[in-house]
Image (tube, rainbow, N blue to C red):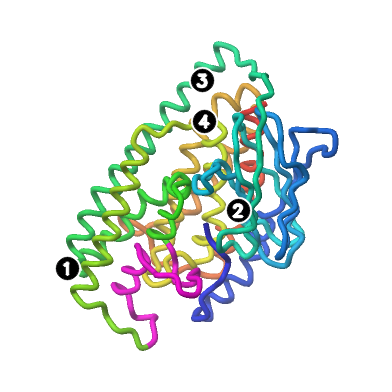
Amino acid sequence: MRNLLVHTVISRPLAAALVVALPALAACTESTESSATGADSRTVTVTSSEEACEVSDVEAPSGTLRFDVTNAGSQVTEFYLLADDGLRIVAEIENIGPQATRQLVTSVPAGSYRTACKPGMSGEGIRAAFTVTDSGEERDVSADEQELVDAALAGYQAYVEDQSAQLLEKTARFVALYEAGEDDEARALYPVARTHWERIETVAESFGDLDPRMDLREADLEPGQEWTGWHRIEKDLWPARAEDYTALTPRQRSTYAQDLLANTETLDAQIQGLEFTVDQIANGSRGLLEEVATGKVTGEEEYWSRTDLYDFQANVDGARVGFEGVQPIVAEKDPELAETLEDRFEALQDLLDEHRSGDGFVAYDELGTEEVKALADAVNALSEPLSRLTAAVLA
């Protein structure tokens, strides 16, 4: 969960690149889809502004729901459907630009929930109770489709658990190097370890405040909020861009490192045995590409280390794995969409491969204006059809 606040210290070439790239990215916040409102009890309209989160209905029948979210404010906003505890994210759509409307499609069982709009993409958001009543209806799924669904769910669950286990193993190694003062080795491992986080970032975000404790950027800090996690350590390892920076003491290093490791252990424990639905997989794929558009392609995520392209690749990896899991289902229902997504994932990957260096990538600062624009355009081209993935899966 990110806001679009950009650090004020940006080199001139990068500033020029962002001027070119951001209009293309802004287009990613638009949705070409709309759905009928009014009598359709499965379509809920949401209007978000700085002061309000107006939801057209306080309840809806169980099954496939569509939330048409319009941002009537001047800040980028987000919309969440939360579990009744207000912590677990059931479904979300982020990075809704001013005056834009985007659609969130998700399958929701009967129960008590909360809606939340987050103007400025920060804070607890504007929340309200939301009830899903038992419609008594069950989606008719053929035996052949159920087989495809079961395969997608099993494959994605195994993928997420494997990435979480690798994240934990590499984080433990990274923490040991950092605490021992082996900074060159820690810097080399930093983007490699984070790859596993970025591949499952949308899953990690669903566990309450684990995401901000582990992955909050300095630019996203709210007044009085403690800064911990990967990016706090990143700044200490790459302090060159910081003004009047005081290096952490060995004791402080250990505190932040052990906190990161403990949170990673908590994340891994919660992920093991976690069950998914096909709409969560499809929405997660879309969400990972949004992470690319709002942080990685703009060079905001890894402000200190400039290792954004590692994160970019990892988000694309996770998005593609999610898509490929449900691809056989989509190919049956909307073969044109499936083919378009496959082609555009490949085109984006080809562009990324041009910036490889050894086993990794060049620093973000080495990208020129046109290279940033090309990546942004490719993300934009993939974003629109990917926004239709969940509706196709649930059709």
- At horizontal 20% and vertical 55% (from top left) the residue drawn is 173
> Looking at numbered disc 2 in the image, what kind of residue is underneath it?
Glu
Q: Upstream in the sequence, badge 3 or badge 1?
A: 3
Look at the image and tell me whether residue 382 can be seen: no
Q: Is residue 193 magenta?
A: no
Nearest the eye: 289 or 254: 254
Q: Upstream in the sequence, badge 4 or badge 1?
A: 1
Q: Mark 3–mark 4 contact, CB under 8 Å?
A: no
Q: Which residues are magenta?
A: 216-243
Q: Mark 3–mark 1 contact, CB under 8 Å?
A: no
Mark 2 falls on what kind of element? strand
On the image, the x and y values in percent for residue 380 come to: 63, 53
> Looking at numbered disc 3 in the image, what kind of residue is underneath it?
Leu
Measured in 3D between alpha carbons, the distance from the residue under mark 1 to the one under mark 2, in whole angstroms, is 38 Å
Tag of residue 182: 1
Q: Upstream in the sequence, badge 1 or badge 2?
A: 2
Mark 4 packing: few (<14 Cα in 10 Å), some, or many (20+)? some
Q: Is residue 13 above or below residue 70?
A: below
> Looking at numbered disc 1 in the image, what kind of residue is underneath it?
Glu
Nearest the eye: 66 or 368: 66
Measured in 3D between alpha carbons, the distance from the residue under mark 3 to the one under mark 1, in whole angstroms, is 47 Å
- The residue under label 2 is 94
Residue 262 appears left or right of 195? left
**Which-is-in-front pick, marks 3 and 2?**
2
Mark 3 packing: few (<14 Cα in 10 Å), some, or many (20+)? some
On the image, the x and y values in percent for residue 230 come to: 35, 62
- The residue under label 3 is 148
- At horizontal 74% and vertical 33% (from top left) the residue drawn is 42
Measured in 3D between alpha carbons, the distance from the residue under mark 2 to the one under mark 4, in whole angstroms, is 20 Å
Q: Upstream in the sequence, badge 2 or badge 4?
A: 2
Mark 1 falls on what kind of element? loop
Tag of residue 277: 4
